[in-house]
Amino acid sequence: MTDPASPRPVIILVEPQLAENIGMTARAMGNFGLDALRLVAPKGGWPMKGVRETASSATHVLDRARIYPTVAEAVADLHYVLATTARERGQMKRVFGPDEALAEAAGRLARAERVGILFGRERVGLSNDEVSLADAIVTFPVDPEHASLNLAQSVLLVAYEWRRAAGRAVLPFTGAMRSSPAPREALISLFESLEAELDAAGYYPPEKRGGMIRNMRDMFHRMAMTEQDVRTFRGALRALARRPPEEG
Amino acid sequence: MTDPASPRPVIILVEPQLAENIGMTARAMGNFGLDALRLVAPKGGWPMKGVRETASSATHVLDRARIYPTVAEAVADLHYVLATTARERGQMKRVFGPDEALAEAAGRLARAERVGILFGRERVGLSNDEVSLADAIVTFPVDPEHASLNLAQSVLLVAYEWRRAAGRAVLPFTGAMRSSPAPREALISLFESLEAELDAAGYYPPEKRGGMIRNMRDMFHRMAMTEQDVRTFRGALRALARRPPEEG
């Protein structure tokens, strides 16, 4: 059951067969902050041998997993149920992509509804009767020629979209610059030093000098240099200018 | 190399170790329409034993994979390179989530740039020098307490976001109703039949009849019934009304 203080959807695997897929499901859930796993009649019994090896740090998900004999029992206490399927079922239900589905789920979770998402067996998915227990269908925008998503991969996409829909998709770090952007006067001073060195080196054909300077200043502007970048470049320029002339 | 007629990013795995991860990477790429895979110095050599077993139908990705001795050689012909990393590197690069990264990549691909995305070794990721070969960093909005994404899982998220950014994220089927919505007169006629049967059965206390009818009509309106739904419900109602009275 989800903690009402921080509502999260329940992931329900129906008759999963491979220990590795259950472990990888737990890992994928842990990656995006899900922890409520229900297993309906896992094929190898429970606990299943080899399941922890692929769970990485998400063994807490496995430790808290609940086992149910049927799908109906696994969804009994839920208010809203989504069924994942790759195939059309001819059932008159809404069909969502994972982004829309988890936006709907996040809205319901925020209103204190308990939400669960059904994932079928590795080879044959959910039966039509099991899909029929759901309010709506989730399917993935796959290439129709290579439509077979691995079980843990589909759980990953759902967990990822839940985290986004719940507004928790914060990156672990940002590209914030550790040095302030250089003020224009520092850039102009750098440009003038560089251009003076290039003049001394005879780099510019006089009739092209103005255009070449503008082009090179544009290159530097595209760098969006920080104060530290300007200092670094000034040092490199000084080192080059000090270089003894080549022999010959 | 990507086909210029239909530009797609190149996925580059650096020193991948497990055959299973390479196979699952190919499968994830195939799911979302990617097919250009480059491997830098795969640990077990190439072709690697056991790699096809986990690729599902995406063996074409493995068959076309190119092998390079170094990252620099693997990115040599590309115009824009992204490096995936879970850790901050202290490098002054832009840091994207997968959605922003693939939006940027899709824009460049549409302008005929060749784009590649680097994924590091299973345990230690990319070296700082390898990250330094990239234009920008991609990181994932994971739970910091369970931040370790499986290699093929991170490729899946990138492939999924590419398909969305490229405007190709079409669901394989929709929830389009196979029957038209019922017109109001069909609904009102159904309501009147139902209410007549309930009147005959003595269901309504007379003083509450008006409110109860409005509540029940609301329930039916929430169903958004199709013409077929109305026919189905009418049949069920007729069957109930024909039922012989219980004895006693």
Image: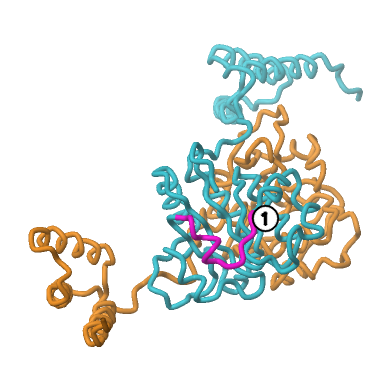
Chain colours: A cyan, B orange
Q: Position of residue A140 (x, y in %)?
A: 53, 63
Q: Residue at x 41, y 52 (%)?
A: A104
Q: Residues within 10 Å of mark 1 (few under 14, many from 20)?
A: many
**Going by the image, does A18 lie left or right of B166?**
right
Three-letter amino acid code of the residue under disc 1? Thr
| Residue under pointer 1 | A25
Asked whether, in this view, residue B44 is left or right of residue A75, the answer is right
Whether residue B145 is visible here, answered yes or no, is yes
Give the residue at the far front of this rendering: B248
Q: Nearer the viewer, residue A124 or B159?
A: A124
x and y percent of residue A102 in the render?
A: 47, 52
Kindly identify the residue that appears in the image at 77 percent across and 70 percent down. B63
Q: Residue furthest left?
A: B207
Q: How many marks?
A: 1
User: Quick one: A113 or B149, which is closer to the camera?
Assistant: A113
Q: In this orientation, which residue lies closer to the viewer: B155 or B81?
A: B155
Q: Is residue A135 magenta?
A: no
The location of residue A88, given as percent across then percent down, is 48, 75
Task: Provide the residue span drawn in magenta.
Answer: A66-78
**x and y, in percent, of residue B222 in the image:** 26, 62
Query: In the image, is residue A77 part of the stretch drawn in magenta?
Result: yes
Q: Residue at x 66, y 70 (%)?
A: A122
- Name the quadrant of the N terminus of chain B: bottom right
Left/right placement of residue A43 relative to residue A110 reads right
Helix, strand or loop status at disc 1:
helix
Q: State whether residue A81 is above or below residue A211.
A: below
Residue B154 appearing in the image = no
